Amino acid sequence: MPYTVDFEKVSTTGLETSPVADALAGLRANEARYFKNKYDHVFTVTPASEAPETLDWVSRILSEERNLVISSRPLEVTSFEVEGFRMAYVFYESGLSINVMYGIEDGAKRAVGFKLAEGMEVPEELAASFKFARQKSRLAGTIRGSFFVIKGEY
């Protein structure tokens, strides 16, 4: 069942099995606030089991671009379009959030972003290839993030 993320009253709904559920909920709320403020988009997530096409698309990009397979269990996903970009998010049980920003027009920006909820370790599959910068968030505490540019067509 879809869940509309409330960034004013942060909830762990859908994320309860994560060992960093509160921090992951704050990270998810931080993304919801960004899209509401910038694009007036309401951020709604769905259990990953109910939207396999979104998870498959993100997993395919990770695999084909960087030979990455995320070992943590995906909890929630969302996919939507705003201002010429297809956006997809996967929130994992470990506290990892992966987003894909995919410009629809040829030559538009395309990238994959990784964000780590406060309290989680850098996943082994990302540790050797990515450096993470820190960012403070009122909703999520300290977020560590990294990204890579997508080169292929998806």
Image: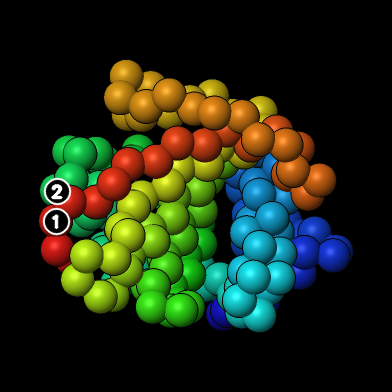
* Residue found farthest to the top: 128
Nearer-the-camera pick, 24 or 47: 24
Nearer-the-camera pick, 93 or 99: 99
**Which residue lies under the disc numbered 1?**
152
**Amino acid type assigned to the residue bearing label 2 in the image:** Glu
Left or right of 65 in this view: 134:
right
> What residue lies at 66% left-to-right and 63% top-to-bottom?
34
Q: Which mark is residue 77?
A: none
- The secondary element bearing badge 1 is classed as loop
**Amino acid type assigned to the residue bearing label 1 in the image:** Gly
Q: Position of residue 49 (x, y in %)?
A: 41, 67
> What residue lies at 66% left-to-right and 49% top-to-bottom?
27
Name the image quarter holding the N terminus: bottom right
Q: Position of residue 4 (x, y in %)?
A: 67, 76
Quarter of the image where one finds residue 109: bottom left
Instruction: Give whichever of discs 2 and 1 has the lower sequence position.
Output: 2
- State yes or no: discs 2 and 1 in contact (Cβ < 8 Å): yes
> What residue lies at 26% left-to-right and 41% top-to-bottom?
69
Left or right of 138 in this view: 121:
left
Quarter of the image where one finds residue 140: top right
Name the image quarter holding the C terminus: bottom left
Viewer-side label of 2, 1: 1
Nearer-the-camera pick, 133 or 89: 133
> What residue lies at 14% left-to-right and 56% top-to-bottom?
152
Within 10 angstroms of label 1, few (less than 14), some, or many (20 or more) residues? few
Q: Is residue 126 visible?
A: yes
Q: Position of residue 47 (x, y in %)?
A: 50, 68
Q: Is residue 105 above or below residue 55?
A: below
**Which residue lies under the disc numbered 2?**
64
Quarter of the image where one finds residue 84: bottom left
